[in-house]
Image (cartoon, grey):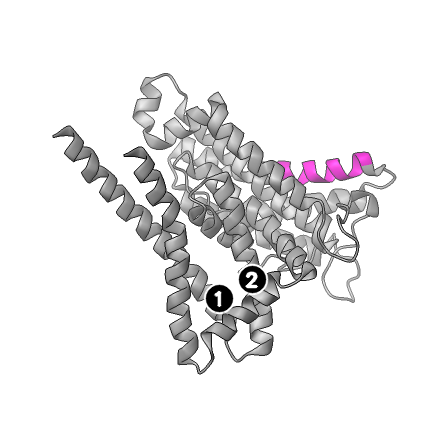
Amino acid sequence: MRLRQKLIAAAMPALAILAALLIVAVMIAGVGESPAEAYRILAQGAVGDWRSLTDTLVKTVPLIFTGLSFAFAAKCNIWNIGAEGQLYMGAVASTAVGVYCTGLPALLHLPLALLAGALAGGLWASIPAWLKVRFKINEVVSTIMLNYTAILIVSALVYGPMIEDPFKSPQTCKILPTARLPVLFEGTKLHAGILLALLACVLYHLIFRHMLFGYRVSAVGKNREAARFSGISVERSICMSMIIAGVFGGLAGAIEMLGTNGLLIIGFSPEYGSDGIAVALLGQLEAVGIFLSAFLLGALRLGATALQRKTDIPQQMITIMQGIIVLFVIAGSAIGRILQNRAAKKEVK
């Protein structure tokens, strides 16, 4: 029975993707374009050659971290909708260290900038964690509000004290080379952030499969009262899961600055935080699934640019596809739980 349940759970994302492709194919045909040709262009633009593949991996990196951010809190049954704000705070902290901490060797400067981004994201996430534990304030409301607050804070800094030149476009000075993530392959944009993302996935897997802390967080997520009765500190688990989720979100922003952008500008994130929710749900909160779903969404994002350039299909069609995939995955998970409950009741009888 367990093997059957695992096979059903593994098949759900694939079925959701297939269903989304079929529905979007009908929509593409409705605007007078060939679905087969559209998907060929989409695939070619995302993974058609070495350059496209590395560009897709670059877009995958922040999605992995924001996906892990949502997933880590979700394991504790906490809805961290604030990865976007944590990403912004991580970006501004790492940029500040990368720009203003001069005279440091690369072996010290780069880790310090990454640490600043991680700490900023964790500290930002500690606010809704404290509000949840102390005043029982819903974390969905507080994290969404803090997203807007973080974006406004970063805007005020970039337009104000961190601006490079008041008479030019609002942006900071370039991050010093000693704080930049190295490029892995010459002639591409792929930087060492992909290695950090893989390391983060491994760490996430180890925490929830082989560590006592991960067991406690999962226990709280499944049944808080039972966890409390067994001696687990529910409040501490909630706070720690949110803070670690914030660390992942902060690293997403830090790596974008230190690896991809090289400076902080207004609106640098195309809603990586929101996409991270889709990544985590599609990946079913598992490390391998999060990596694969982040790669899929990164490929869709990059392929959409080629699709819009070579056809009359609007780029919003890819957003619709992404939404349908997530909707189908959620529906499939709900159906799977219903089937599991029915099977369990039959076994009892």
Which residue reaches farthest top? 231
Q: Could you tell me which residue is drawn at 41 percent across and 33 percent down?
A: 76
Q: On screen, 102 above or below 225? A: below
Q: Measuring from the top left, give residue 157's x and y in whole percent.
A: 68, 52
Q: Residue at x 34, y 17 (%)?
A: 230
Mark 1 nearby-residue class (10 Å; few <14, some 14–19, many ≥20): many
Do the numbered discs 2 and 1 sit on residues whose CB atoms are within 8 Å?
yes
Label disc, if present, on residue 173 of the rendered structure: none
In this rendering, is residue 274 above or below 237? below
Left or right, 47 with reference to 72: right
- Amino acid type indicated by mark 2: Arg
Q: Report the span colored magenta.
A: 107-119
Q: Which mark is residue 301?
A: 2
Q: Amino acid at mark 1?
A: Ile
As drawn, the label of residue 318 is: 1
Determine the secondary structure under disc 1. helix
Query: Could one spot residue 45 in this view of the protein?
Result: yes
Foreground residue among 337 and 53 = 53
Residue 277 among those drawn in magenta: no
Query: What x and y, as percent, mark residue 69?
Result: 52, 41
The residue lying toward the viewer, choosing from 207 and 143, is 207
Q: CA distance from mark 2 to mark 1?
A: 7 Å
